[in-house]
């Protein structure tokens, strides 16, 4: 394969992985927060004193956006996108794109569902203020799978960019010549 | 079991409000205590614990209280309606007042004591002066039909039948305009039960079944049911023609209340509707949650009016208890 094309492909795939991770995570978080905020503002229109308790529950789905950003930053850092020199092969770049897509999907849906779970919890707090402590636990459980996806994406990114043979684009390009 | 619609975030705000307002619903025990007071002063003292506390004024008679309680209900429903993406859910609960005002308008009266729901006072005044064109559909057609009946001197009872039928058709259409199976089923059962009670009472007052058939039908999806019911002028036979819960409630009314079957059926059907609407409490954001809340508030309003106005009119608590409706919290 042409060396310039290989570098461009690797860069494109790595960028795609990073972009998918933060776009899907951010999009899901925005939707989740919007969902929870709509119910929360309804409750606050009747009970303004609950602002402090509801703020945490509205903010809960926002973490996925940050997880997506962490994954994207790590991919960019580990593949050389930040330094300007891509250091992975096209196949590794493609693998990273798939990791970014998978992690992004989990971040997206977990944020949307967490927003709905938060909304249900907010509705419960609106009705029974003493249930605030327990109501926050259920949406927090949805977070577990966003964290699992974040850890998986970090580990896969580390393994894929661990300078194994063929992982580095320079090694990849040099390999046919050596043979 | 009727399925609830998926989470609809555009209903989130109003459902959040409803959640907070549900905390202020009165418990069944509140009404049991209220009805058991032997002295009116004790009843008024207990009302201080209700949302009506600001309206408690000594010396008010039962008519004042009826107006206060109705006014409270209408203000709440209209406030909820203003936050609903589809106002039809709230209009189901206040539409009746428009038709009561419309009845006054078509008979030429210009004083409208019932609350505004979808028709403004100006529109009603114009209709009273003979200009029904200012009314939105389907009020316009109803007003024209009722006015024609008056001009042809077909009798005021017939005007009542025309307006009853138009109200029920409109109510059914409101329910069907909401994309939620529970709301549609609620509206259908509400209309069916109201139509049965109306037919029952009209037939009892001597209006022929053929006349009722002429004005009550068609009634949307309920046309076959009502046509089957109207084929027999004897209400005792209606239960066989009515499938589901309403048929069962009709049989129960005949078993439990000899001589007052229509009233008993009305009460049983109202409780059935409360239980049906209660399923909407499982919805976080959707029209079903609003329906459930407003239905509960409507039952509370009925109980409050019944007890307060009844006690002020010196009716015994035991008699009032029989007419009280289920009010879930």
Image (cartoon, rainbow, N blue to C red):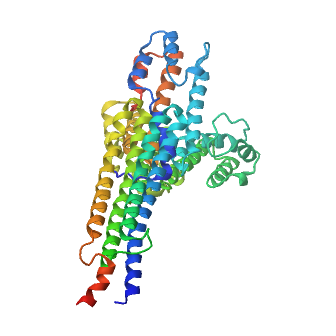
Where is B177 relative to B265, above or below?
below
Quarter location, residue B96: top right
B255 or A98: nearer the viewer: A98
Quarter location, residue A119: top left
A117 or A70: nearer the viewer: A70
B321 or B44: nearer the viewer: B44
Residue B21 at least partly seen: yes
- Rendered residue at 27%/60% (across/down): A152
Q: Is residue B39 left or right of residue B232?
A: right
Residue B196 at least partly seen: no
Q: Which residue is situated farthest in the right direction here?
A: B129
Q: Position of residue A162 (x, y in %)?
A: 27, 68
Q: Is residue A89 left or right of residue B99?
A: left
Q: Which residue is situated farthest in the front direction here?
A: A178
Please tell me how many numbered marks the rendered image carries. Answer: 0
A70 or B225: nearer the viewer: A70
Where is the C terminus of chain B found, in terms of image quarters? top left
Q: Position of residue B115 (x, y in %)?
A: 63, 36
Q: Position of residue B316 (x, y in %)?
A: 44, 15
Q: Position of residue A74 (x, y in %)?
A: 37, 62
- Rendered residue at 37%/61% (across/down): A71
- Rendered residue at 51%/13% (across/down): B45
Where is A177 relative to B7, above or below?
below
Where is A140 relative to B45, above or below?
below
């Amino acid at each position: 394969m042409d060396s310039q094309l290989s570098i461009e492909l690797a860069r494109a795939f790595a960028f795609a992985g990073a972009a998918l991770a933060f776009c899907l995570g951010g999009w899901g978080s925005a939707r989740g927060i919007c969902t929870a905020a709509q119910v929360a503002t309804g409750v606050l229109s009747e009970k303004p004193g609950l602002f402090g308790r509801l703020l945490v529950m509205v903010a809960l789905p926002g973490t996925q956006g940050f997880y997506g950003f962490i994954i994207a930053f790590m991919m960019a850092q580990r593949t050389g996108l930040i330094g300007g020199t891509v250091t992975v092969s096209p196949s590794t770049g493609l693998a990273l794109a798939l990791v970014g897509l998978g992690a992004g999907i989990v971040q997206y849906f977990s944020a949307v569902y967490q927003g709905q779970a938060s909304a249900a919890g907010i509705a419960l707090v609106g009705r029974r203020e003493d249930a605030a402590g327990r109501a926050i636990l259920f949406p927090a459980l949805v977070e577990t799978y966003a964290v699992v996806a974040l850890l998986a994406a970090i580990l896969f990114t580390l393994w894929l960019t661990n300078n194994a043979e063929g992982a580095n684009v320079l090694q990849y390009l040099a390999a046919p010549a050596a043979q | 079991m009727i399925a609830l619609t998926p989470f609809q975030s555009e209903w989130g705000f109003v459902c959040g409000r409803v959640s907070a307002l549900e905390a202020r619903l009165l418990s069944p025990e509140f009404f049991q205590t209220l009805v058991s007071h032997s002295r009116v002063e004790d009843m008024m003292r207990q009302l201080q614990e209700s949302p009506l506390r600001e309206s408690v004024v000594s010396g008010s008679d039962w008519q004042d209280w009826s107006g206060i309680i109705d006014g409270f209900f209408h203000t709440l429903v209209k406030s909820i309606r203003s936050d609903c993406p589809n106002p039809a859910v709230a209009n189901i609960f206040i539409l009746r007042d428009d038709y009561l005002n419309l009845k006054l308008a078509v008979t030429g009266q210009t004083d409208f004591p019932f609350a505004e729901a979808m028709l403004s006072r100006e529109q009603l005044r114009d209709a009273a002066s003979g200009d029904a064109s200012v009314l939105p559909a389907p009020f316009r057609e109803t007003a024209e039909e009722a006015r024609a009946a008056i001009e042809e001197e077909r009798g005021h009872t017939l005007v009542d039948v025309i307006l009853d039928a138009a109200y029920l058709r409109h109510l059914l259409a409101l329910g069907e305009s909401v994309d939620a199976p529970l709301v549609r089923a609620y509206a259908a059962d509400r209309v069916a039960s109201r139509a049965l009670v109306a037919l029952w009472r009209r037939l009892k007052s001597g209006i022929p079944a053929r006349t009722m058939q002429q004005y009550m039908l068609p009634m949307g999806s309920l046309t076959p049911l009502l046509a089957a019911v109207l084929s027999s002028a004897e209400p005792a036979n209606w239960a066989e023609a009515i499938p589901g819960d309403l048929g069962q409630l009709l049989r129960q009314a005949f078993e439990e209340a000899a001589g007052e079957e229509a009233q008993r059926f009305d009460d049983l059907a109202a409780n059935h509707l409360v239980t049906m609407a209660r399923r909407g409490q499982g919805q976080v954001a959707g029209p079903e949650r609003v329906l459930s809340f407003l239905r509960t508030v409507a039952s509370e309003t009925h109980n409050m009016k019944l007890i307060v106005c009844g006690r002020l009119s010196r009716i015994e608590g035991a008699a009032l208890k029989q007419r009280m409706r289920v009010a879930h919290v």
